[in-house]
Image: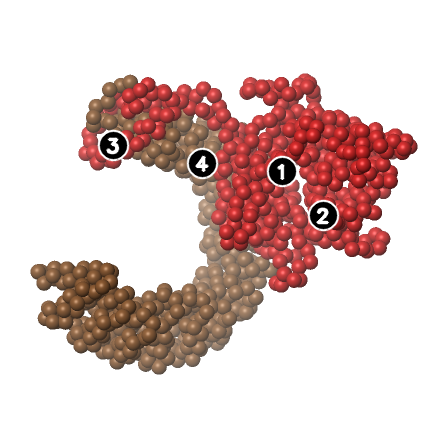
Amino acid sequence: MSNGGAIAAVAPVGGPQPLDWKFSQVFGERIAGEEVQEVDIISSIEFDRTGDHLATGDRGGRVVLFERTDTRDHVGLRKDLEKMDCPMNRHPEFRYKTEFQSHEPEFDYLKSLEIEEKINKIRWCQSANGALFLLSTNDKTIKFWKVHEKKVKKVCDVNVDSTKATVNGSIVGSSISTSSKQYIESGRCIDNNFSFPTTGFPSLQLPVVTSIETNLMARCRRIYAHAHDYHINSISNNSDGETFISADDLRINLWNLEISNQSFNIVDVKPANMEDLTEVITSAEFHPKHCNMLAYSSSKGSIRLIDMRQSALCDSHSKLFEEQGALGTRSFFTDIIASISDIKFAKDGRHILSRDYMTLKLWDINMDSGPVATFQVHEHLRPKLCDLYENDSIFDKFECCLSGDGLRVATGSYSNLLRVFGCSEGSTEATTLEASKNPMRRQGQTSSRPLRSLGSLSGVVRRVKGADNPGVDANGNAFDFTTKLLHLAWHPTENSLACAASNSLYMYYA
Amino acid sequence: MAMIDEPLYPIAVLIDELKNEDIQLRLNSIRRLSTIARALGEERTRKELIPFLGENNDDDDEVLLAMAEELGVFIPYVGGVEHANVLLPPLETLCTVEETCVRDKAVESLCRIGAQMREQDLVEYFIPLVKRLAAGEWFTARVSSCGLFQIAYPSAPEALKTELRAIYSQLCQDDMPMVRRSAATNLGKFAATVEAPHLKVDIMSMFDDLTQDDQDSVRLLAVEGCAALGKLLEPQDCVAHILPVIVNFSQDKSWRVRYMVANQLYELCEAVGPEPTRSDLVPAYVRLLRDNEAEVRIAAAGKVTKFCRILNPELAIQHILPCVKELSTDSSQHVRSALASVIMGMAPVLGKDPTIEQLLPIFLSLLKDEFPDVRLNIISKLDQVNQVIGIDLLSQSLLPAIVELAEDRHWRVRLAIIEYIPLLASQLGVAFFDDKLGALCMQWLKDKVYSIRDAAANNVKRLAEEFGPDWAMQHIVPQVLDMINNPHYLYRMTILHAISLLAPVMGSDITCSKLLPVVINASKDRVPNIKFNVAKVLQSVIPIVDQSVVEKTIRPCLVELTEDPDVDVRFFATQALESSNQVMMC
């Protein structure tokens, strides 16, 4: 795995063939020179368990849902299908399904704090009765959403025509309600000694309802609020289907999906004196199978596995994963770049993938002496840490993901690049994709690395960049710190990746 | 558009509003579904209303919940039990919705209807419904089905019974933990309807599956099943099948499961009978009392008295008491608090000597606990203490604890102790009270927190009731009346409140001679709030005192207040005058 840092694709020695990634789809593609609205920037991506649905959240507090189109016949509206180039493909294809405003900007008057509407995380819950359920969270408040098809109803026949005009559809309700209030009251009075004939009153009729079409509706079913003093960085569902956790910088709370007014604090790393604070929680996730296990990562680069069976307050971990002895000399940046920005359990629950600023690390939960594999992602940035620190890029939180079969891992980088590594025994697969319609362009460029003099090529290829790009290093590698690919997700069953480049959602398959 | 007669109009509106846009109106209509049904008549209710409701399954949860509830009592409106089956389809639909409370209500209503249905109808309609739900595509239907077996099973023919048992067994192994939880929850009720031979074989094997489930949440529901199944089985089967499971559960890896055992152990002991309790469950219980997890110890400590009651004293002293001693110094105050709330009940179980020898030191240490909750829990059970160890021993240690609580920083703690003062007074007697507690009662009248002053005024009244007017005249009234000169008007108001409470207890004479002059005097206060409170107090005193006093003292004072510059004072004075007029007319 040591050569993972090299950008070149190396022919496999063992293990599966490297994947040949192809562009599949893009949603919200930017036209050259188009200004990106801050609120449109995607801040979260998540596939559901089946892979039939994909959700993205953005900084404007919206959640957009996509559904897979290539697996079954669709009888609904097909207008979105027009965008597809080749609808007969076998790889996952998605279309826009619906979107809703999940969070609004708020102001906490007690603490004089603005609460952004930005969606930090989305997690899918068990679907039921054809309805989709998901949790979305911003910094403070978690919401439980149900998205379902609701019949649009028209009431055509009623007993009381109070409008005198033709009774037409749903307006009848609101118009009756005001005039009928007093009758309802009087109705109450007569009921007790009102005699009903056994056959009933034939003149009464039930309203006739016709439903013409169905509409997708998103309803907020529950709001889990006021449980976090700090910013929520993760939410994660338990395999028991009834609980989930939410983690902020210092605490992890356990909720029951059905109970929104109480949660239990299970991890609290807040020191008695805040001046003693050295470490914060950066990410947390439940084990995919064992309902009692969860892992959380810290800003010091450690991952703790806790067993909720042991005690109600899980302040002591049952396993600690840390890389012992930093390689090379320690510097001012050592602690900063050690901070883990994301962890993910593999589907089998045996491995945990973690992302820190420089690397991806794969851990075996049965081996706490060190990672089983380390993939260099940003090693080439080491000389530039000073600049990265100064423009705050060093604090960027890149996410990571594993393929459903657990054979590959992926994470994002700068210049809208993403890296895919093979993590099976003996695999040397290391691919770089660019989030554009031509993902292997980088590959092509790097494979022709001998032509180093073509450094200016990057200026040609990258349409948004000027020729005097300051992010071009000595090797001709361009790094644009403003275009970073932070969020990505791997389809749970197929080799398909969804990643967010600013406001655009790019999908690739192999 | 049909013409509607005037008297039918309200019902017509009610029917129309079943489909109104406003959820409140829809809810209102659903809640009055019986009225609608009566207006439509039984036949149209069956043929039109019920199918109409069946289609109404994507409404808001509140409406669906109300509908599920109404349908449960709808048999009279569809023409009696012979037509009860028409109610099943809409409820079946409601059994599949995602909202748990709606499903639960629909299951409850189905059970209620099923319990009244004729046997052939159950076989023809109800059992197929249960089977459909149990085979439902979505987990919601399967979750609901678990609660219906208890109704379906008894009336099923033999072959169908076998099938139902097989289906339930399948549900116990469902992929979805939610379904397995529902199966575990309902296993006891279902088992109660199953014949003994099948109980031992089929039901016990389902139970075994559930007790070994991977999910903690399923296993801990299986714990509840232990008690229910234990009651159904013969004692020897219970010892053979249930007891090992309980002992296993008490050592489960998950504290939540152990917590359930700790909570339920008493019921489990009842189920397995006294003998195995001693040999097997005492060690299990002792383990729980010494559990690593505070939550488990809290649950176990709270049951210590109940558990001791089913043991003989020797066993309790030998095994339980040492643990109780440890728990009294537990690191978690919640454990100590749980122990303090029940520990006094152990005294009668142990008898006098062991109590004084062993329990008293524990009790005294809890009384000195640093957490007020612990002390309060002990004090609230004081009557039980008194019976066993006598007042002398008690008073030495009790007093410092009370004084400390009386001055606690948290006003809720002070409030709690005030509420116990009358009880303490009656138990400790006049002499003890005079010396030690009298001053405290006066001090509370001057508390910074209104709720405390209010409670203190009430306390003064209850003490006067307890010890009689003569005692109160000596020990309370002078001190209370002294405080009317307090410079702060809020304290003066508290005293007025206390006077109005004391007056009925003290009787006419003392009220006229001692209390009334003070009130009249206060009517000259410079603060309007005091003055209108004077008017209120005078109004409350009028029925107690003699007519002549009203004429001579109270009315002149009130008349004067009706001319006060402050509008509120005038209002209350006028009100008091009016009520005095009414009394005179009577």
Residue A419 visible in the current orientation: yes
Q: Secondary structure at mark 1?
A: helix
Q: Who is closer to the viewer here, B84 or A451?
A: A451
Mark positioned earlier in the residue sequence (1 or 3): 1
What distance separates the C-alpha of mark 1 from that of mark 2?
18 Å
The chain drawn in red is A
- Occupied quadrant, residue B476: bottom left
> Which numbered dot is residue A38?
1
Residue A494 visible in the current orientation: no
Q: Amino acid at mark 1?
A: Glu
Q: Who is closer to the viewer here, B451 or B267?
A: B451
What distance separates the C-alpha of mark 4 from that of mark 2?
52 Å
Horizontally, is B513 left or right of A472 in the view? left
> Which numbered dot is residue B103?
4
Compared with residue B366, is residue A263 higher up or lower down, i.e. above or below?
above
The residue to which callout 2 is attached is A392
Q: Position of residue B187 (x, y in %)?
A: 49, 41
Q: Secondary structure at mark 2?
A: loop
